[in-house]
Structure formats: structure tokens, C-alpha cells
Image (cartoon, coloured by chain):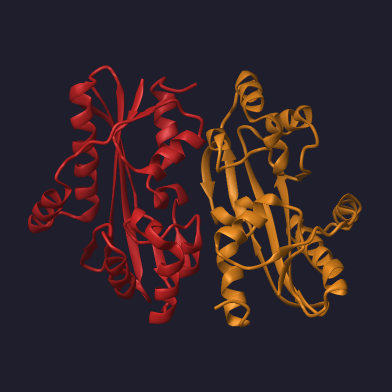
Chain colours: A orange, B red
Amino acid sequence: MIILASASASRAAILHHAGLPFEAMPAHIDESAIKLAGAAAGETPGAVAQTLARLKAQRISARCPAALVIGADQILSAGDVWFDKPESTAEAESHLRRLRGQTHTLHTAVCCLRDSQMIWHHLATPTLTMRALSDDFIADYLAAEGDDCLSSVGAYRLEGRGIQLFERIDGDFFAILGLPILPLLGFLRQHGAVG
Amino acid sequence: MIILASASASRAAILHHAGLPFEAMPAHIDESAIKLAGAAAGETPGAVAQTLARLKAQRISARCPAALVIGADQILSAGDVWFDKPESTAEAESHLRRLRGQTHTLHTAVCCLRDSQMIWHHLATPTLTMRALSDDFIADYLAAEGDDCLSSVGAYRLEGRGIQLFERIDGDFFAILGLPILPLLGFLRQHGAVG
């Protein structure tokens, strides 16, 4: 049995489309506190994303020790600034105004646990360069996207209109969407969890 | 007015999701004859894909000279062999048996015409490495995909279960799906065709 320790609709869709049988179980941890502590301790965004992915998976693995539990997390950084998922359209607007015209990194961590032991982990770091968007463009974009823009840490969905924000995208497309499915499938096959 | 000179549901979906207003008009040309002639003349798959994209767009541009017409084509090559879109599940099976365990290239051409003049073109060449799939795996995959496997030149849809066929994917994800949307949007903005 495979459990995705995540409430993310995007991650569930990636696993579902790949034809993988799994159950999704959201794991509630205090992400903000862990991020603040990690940043204060001088940890990299990638290391903190890996910690968060592991803690989510551990929460579920403790309840379902026989299951193979997938944990995942994504942190967006631009220069020294880390961004959280926007909670309102106003916050999404503020994020986009700060991200425009520069390159940011999506530190995307995924790991697998069984019986509370980590048996595999992977970190992908795709980078995206946003165009020098005008205030009007950002306002029109957010009006067209509505609450959809609140579903991702960068306030964009590349599968949708969000592609219009970018001038360059480098790295694994599935990692950008939140789950590096290719290395994950490689591990699951090697582990005998999928055919 | 923007016209997509293509019957491809995948290309139309990419433009639609990006929020672009357009009409789709399939352009019927004898692709096989042009491919055979190009190969016989020693042309590269990329050059022939560009020719096919241009001919499709020209067919529509002659009818709608005021429109901005987008033409696109994709040719799959593995070593010296070019592959056509499979017309049956049996042909898809034969393709997958020949592609397994090796790297192939998707020569993906896109161009824009107005009044029968080419005003922009782009060629993307993503490469994909297929796993050494067993005959049983291929049979199970094709049974699960049904006629969906006939919609792409490589008999796979990366947005779906097709991701399971691969061990490595390099290059523009949208080009793999049939339309390099990022450079296309860049041109359309520069040309004043989108905001």
C-alpha cells in the first residue's frame, strides 16, 4: 500500500495520472515554525524542504507502519528570500511583484518512508525566470486565475495561464508541479512497489 | 485573430490552457509523401518537421491572409529511423518494442505566418530515454491506455501513464507535448498579438 502524505491536489493528480494506486492522507505539521527555525539555523531551503517532506511522511508512517509513505515539500527562494504559499490574492500580488524580472528556485523534496525509516529521498531544484511583468498584467492575471493562484507556492500554475508569466524555465517539469515523478517511479520500481 | 493550423487536441489544449484566444483549423497535407521526399533528399528530421509546419500554416494562411497562423509538426527519430504516429494498437506495440532501451528525439517545429509570409519559426529537440520495457509491460500499458496511445507520435502521453515508460527526459516539456509554448508566447508578445 502506498500513501501520499500530502493534501496537495497537484501531487495527487501526478500520481493518479501516472496510474499509481495510492491513498492521500494529509499530514498536519507546523511548517512555518520549522521553516523559521531552519532559516535561523542557517540551513539551505533545500535542506528545510527535505526536513518538511520527512516530517510529513513520519507523521503518517507512525500511524501506518506497513505502508510505503511518500512525503513531499517545496520551498521557493529568490536570492535570500523564501516565499510561502500565498493565502490571499493580495499576498499573491505581492509575491508576483517581488518575483518579476528575476530567477527563482523551487526546492522540491520527496522521500519515501516505511515503518518510520527513510528508505529513499530526492531533491530537485528547477529554476524559473519571470518576465518583467507590469502591475496591470499581474492584476489581470490574478483576476483571470481567481483562487487557483493560491494553490501553488509561486502563485502560478504552469499547466494554465501561469505559463504567460515566464521567459525561461529550466528543470524537471513535474518537480515544478510539486512531485519529481520520474525519480520517484524509479525508486518504487526498484523497491518492488510498482510493476 | 490567431489560427492554429492543426487538428491536434494536445496543441489546442496547450494554447487554451495558456489563455490564448484562437481558432483551430486542421490543414490537410500529404505528410507521408513530404517525409519520404525529405528523407530521400537527405534532409534532417528537424528540417522536414519545419517544412511540414510551414506547409500546414501556408494552407490556412492562403485562405485567411489577415490572420496570424501557427503551424506545428513533430517527427520522432531514433538513430536513423523516423517514426510516424501509430495507426493501430498493434503498430503502437511495434513502435514501443523498437524504442525501448534507447534514446529518441522529438523534433518539434513551430512557425507563424501572416499573409503567407513566415514571420517566425522555432525548432525544439527534446530527448527521451525509454526503459528496457518487457513485452508484458508494453502489452499491459497499451491495454490500459486504449486508443489514447494513438494520439501521439511516440505512442505515449507523458501527462498520463506514459511517464512510466521513461527513465530520463531532457528538454522542454511543452515541446514534448507538441507545442513549445514559451518561445511561441515570446514571439506573439513581441509581435503584439497577445498582451
A131 with respect to B86 (left or right) = right
A187 with respect to B171 (left or right) = right
Above or below, A134 against A29 in this view is above
Above or below, B97 against B159 in this view is below
Identify the residue shown where x is 38% and y is 76%: B101
Quarter-wise, where is residue A90 in the image? top right
Identify the residue shown where x is 60% and y is 33%: A101
Q: Position of residue B40 (x, y in %)?
A: 8, 58
Q: Position of residue B69 (x, y in %)?
A: 29, 28
Above or below, B50 against A60 in this view is above
The answer to whether residue B157 shows anywhere in this view is yes
A90 with respect to B148 (left or right) = right
Q: Position of residue A60 (x, y in %)?
A: 83, 68
Q: Quadrant of the N terminus of chain B?
A: top left
Above or below, A31 against A50 in this view is above
The answer to whether residue B166 shows anywhere in this view is no
Identify the residue shown where x is 30% and y is 20%: B67
